[in-house]
Amino acid sequence: MPIIRSYVELISIMKSLDDYLSFSAFVILLSSMSGLFHLNFHLWTLSEDDYLHTLVGEIYLSVSFAVVILSASAANNAFLAAKEAICSLPWKIPYYYKEVKIVIWSECARDVSLTLWKTYKIERSLIFSAIGTLVTYGILLGSLDRY
């Protein structure tokens, strides 16, 4: 069963990626989010000439934030698709149904996903919720500082 061996190898790759890169992804996202908050907080106190620098900073930090989230969520979605394909394999080979099912449940039942410092599973919806929250609170606190 080379497909099951490939899936087991995929599990080990995802687990090692999560072990070695989850803290780095957390630091990148935390620094991008704090930079976005800082830029939006000081948006109201800028002169007209500084808006271009703020826009460039917003674009840079948003892109670095989005690159991490989109790539990790795409990897998580691809892993879920592979897991669904493996779990449906016993019904596609009815002659070896019991043997294939035993092998799949013994080796492939683990659920692995890329996380942020092993605390939060990375999903695509994190982009909208985090950026929306940071922009809103940055502008709100910046307008309070103005008065």
Image (spheres, rainbow, N blue to C red):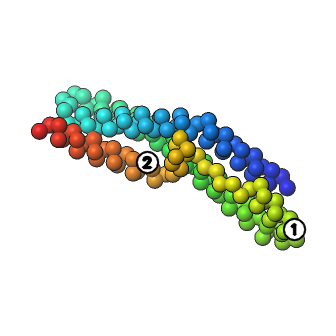
Q: Tell me the kind of residue under disc 2.
A: Ile
Q: Residue furthest left?
A: 147
Residue at 53%, 41% in the rendered image: 117
Q: Residues within 10 Å of mark 1 (few under 14, many from 20)?
A: few
Q: Earlier in the sequence, mark 2 or mark 1?
A: 1
Residue at 45%, 50% in the rendered image: 126
Q: Residue furthest right?
A: 95
Image quadrant in which the N terminus is located? bottom right
| Distance Cα–Cα, label 2 vs label 1 | 44 Å
Residue at 18%, 41% in the rendered image: 143
- Return the residue at label 1: 96
Left or right, 102 with respect to 144, comes to right
Left or right, 130 with respect to 107, comes to left
Q: Which mark is residue 127?
A: 2
Q: Could one spot residue 135 in this view of the protein?
A: yes
Image location (x, y in percent) of residue 4: 79, 54
Image location (x, y in percent) of residue 89: 77, 64
